[in-house]
Structures are given as structure tokens and as C-alpha cells.
Image (cartoon, rainbow, N blue to C red):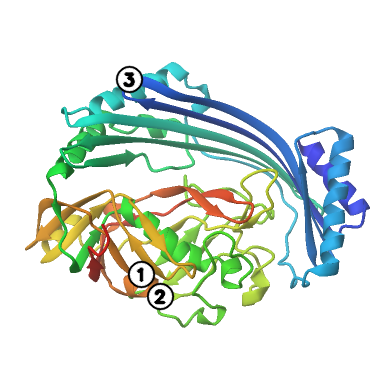
Amino acid sequence: MQQIAKNAVDEAVRLGAEYADARVCHYQDQRVDVRDEIVTNLLDREEIGVGVRCYYGGAWGFAATHVLTPEEIAATAARAVAVARASATLAPRLGPLAPVYPHVTTYVTPHEIDPFTVPLEEKIDLLLSITKGMHVGPEVRRAIAFMEFTREHKVFANSVGSVIDQTIIRSHASCTAFAVGQREFKTRMFETPPLNIGYEHIKRQDWEKEARRVGEEAVGQLSAVDVEPGYKTLVLSPSHLCLTIHESVGHPTELDRILGMEADMAGTSFVKPEMLGRFQYGSPLVNLVADRTMPNGRSTVGFDDDGVPTRRFDVVRDGVLVGVSTNRETAFAIGDEDSRACNYADGYNSTPIVRIPNLCLQPGGKDAPTLEELISDTEDGILIDGRGSFSIDHQRYNFQFGGDCFWEIKHGKIGRMLKNVTYRANSTDFWRSLDAVCNADYWQPQGVVNCGKGQPGQRAQMTHGAPWARFRNIKVGEAR
């Protein structure tokens, strides 16, 4: 793989590229789906190919192939150079690229058990037991569960001398119960936080306990009462906040969206470059940190697809917007000398673009409340757990979110289940309403595995960790 990447780069440079890089990628994917006592899907997929990117006259060119013969590699490099030359005659010239330095190294996701060495029978048996455990009563008419695993072996080489060999391993599992009543049905879901980790992540879960809880809470929602529309205090779980962080902070702070360079998938951003360092994005309790080096993070790698070492940086500090996600192409626009290593392509045949890194809400300090204290200090509110429906405008500003399960909070105590809970706000009013975050004992890494962006569309994955947190005076119940 290394020689293929080097040959592609050498050929692009020989043909006149000012800069060139190549990614040779070998993907292995496995997914197992179970419905009740039936295996409904078995997927084992492998794919390999090379993508060649070059820079000429202020423009990029890109080409890819899955045919790894010397002749096809040379032809692919030639196509990439030709595209760059043609683009340079038409496209506005890009600003200066942030520098990239030579690295010759290897990175492997830390893991204990390679999921691809675990017998398929073991995975199926566990999934069957999970679905069986969700059948807690006759109301549960259907139970589904799945596991999915990925190994991404990527060799990156560029014309400044880098040769970077990375192996990324991802593991994820989930289960959902469907309960049916006289007039409606309800669902409840649990998932292992999707992480870059081995099969030990699956084995550590108490699936018997979680399956039973999911079944019981699906049934419980059948007798839940409708939420009364109005303004409420919301106590939000980490599994719920991950999507809110993703949509209302992650996407608005991608610099290509901010600059209007990307609008194909879900629009641009209300954020402007001049807001950095001066715009009050949230309350002083809002501290959001981007970190592609965090242990087991879903977007954690050693180097991004520009060949830049990954790093940690603040996005919102004490409520103030201080950072955005950049790559080599966009960093100059905000005066940064270096890229923040947020470039990523979802396949050898995709050109890398700015993607949200692991982006996490930081917990409070040692004096921050426990979850019990947070609830006891809430007079009239709603506890929301898990992800549900969502909608956000093309500026990533006005939004509406649902959830997976809801409980009323009255006079500091959790009460009856609620249903049909949605809330709406705009991104800044919402984060400015944050008035409490729990301490580090209540912080959990959650994540997103199907973030869409670009045209043609690409899929990316990232962790959004958070503690339990409380938001005051949020409008609920306008949509059912």
C-alpha cells in the first residue's frame, strides 16, 4: 500500500502538480441485524482503492480508482493533475494553504479485542438474547438489535515526504423495543456509545439489564400523558445532548460552511468569522472542546486526511465563541497559521472536506451538582433522555428537537412519563439558557455515526460527550 501511494504522488508531481497526496484505503465492514428470533441481515464487505489529490495554480484536482495496477495508478494521477489544471482556469484562486510537514509514522486505534476475530455465532447469540430480553410483556410486539464494526486501514503519502499508516477500528451496538397499544405504538432505544474501540466495548455492557429496561420503558410510554405546551426547564441527558451539540454547535462552526464554500447538505451557518473571540454563544457554563486525540473518540485518529497531526482546541470557552473547525484550505481565512486537522474523506473515492471533530461539553468542577441535586433543584421541568426527531434551518440557527423518553419533574422529584415532547429555540438562546452542568461523574461519551455533508454526499462519525445539564425557560410541546 505504501508503494502504491508513493507512486501516485511521484507521478502527479512529475506531471506538474505543486503538491500531491494519495490515500490507499482498505475497508472492512461487518453488520449483524436481528429481529426477535430472526437474523435479518448479515453484511461482510471489503473494499480497497486509492484517491489522488493534487494542487496546481490555486486549485485542487482529484481522481480515484479501485484498480491498483501501476498503469491505472499513473492514469489516475494524470486525471487528478488534469482536473487541477482545468479548475485553475475557472475557479477563484484559493488562499494560501496552511503548511504541512513530513511525518513517517503508524497509528492504530487502541483496542483489546479485534471485533473481526470474534466468531459470528457469538455475536448472533448475544443479539438474540438481547431481543428476547426486551419482550417484557405482550405489549412488546417487536424487538430489534444490531452490531456493526469497521476496520479502516489507510496509508497516506504526500509530496513533502509523509508516509502515514493508520488503522482505525470502530464498534457499535444498539437495541430497540416497539410497544403497541390500542391507539398508538411507542419505541425505546439503547445503544453502546459508538466509539473507536474493540469488541470489549460490547462485552462490558450489561445487556440483560438494558434490554429489560428498554422493554419496560417502551411499554410505559403507552400510558404516558401528553405534554402541556409552554415554557419549561429541561434536564437533558448526555445521550440527548449529543445530537443537540452536533446540530447547533458542530455544524455552525465548520469554517467551510461559515465561508459559504459548503452549502449542498443542510446549508451554511449563522456564524461569521468576525464573531471569534467576542460573540456570546452561550452562558458562562458553556465550555465546548474539540479533540480528535481523545481516547476512543469516534473521529479520533493520529492524522487527518491532509496529513496534519490531530489536536485539541476550544470552540466555546466560558460561553464565548473562540474556535472553529478548519483544514489546510480554510485556515488562512481566520488568520490561523496552522490547520486544526479537521479534514476527512469517508472513502478513497471521496475528496476530503472539513468535518466536525469530537466536540464535547465539559462537566462542571468538583462543586458542580450531581444529577440528583440538579433534579431536586428543579421546580417544574422535563427530563429528556435519548435522541428523537430534529429539524434545523439552513443557517443552523432555529431548531426543534424531540427525544426518546420523557419524564415530568415536579417540586424536585421525577414523576410521571410524558409523551409527544418537542422543544424549540435558536442555537444561541438555547445555550445561553444553560444554568447548570453536572460534575465529571455524570459525563458520558455519546456520538453520531451518520453525519451527512457534501455533494456527492459523504458520511462522517464523531463523539459528542456531555454531562447531564439543565436549560431554563425553553418552549415545549408545539409539535407532535
The foreground one among 357 and 176 is: 176
Identity, as a three-letter code, of the amino acid under mark 1: Val
Give the crowd class for mark 1: few <14, some 14-19, many >=20 residues within 10 Å.
Answer: many
Foreground tag (1 vs 3): 3
Foreground tag (3 vs 2): 3
Identity, as a three-letter code, of the amino acid under mark 2: Tyr
Q: CA distance from mark 3 to mark 2?
A: 48 Å
Identity, as a three-letter code, of the amino acid under mark 3: Glu
Badge number at residue 222: none
Q: Are marks 3 and 2 in contact (CB under 8 Å)?
A: no
Q: Which residue is mark 2?
A: 281
Give the crowd class for mark 2: few <14, some 14-19, many >=20 residues within 10 Å.
Answer: many
Could you tell me which secondary element the residue under label 3 belongs to? loop
Quick one: label 1 or label 2, which is nearer the N terminus? 2
On screen, residue 189 versus residue 223, left or right, reads right
Q: Are marks 1 and 2 in contact (CB under 8 Å)?
A: yes
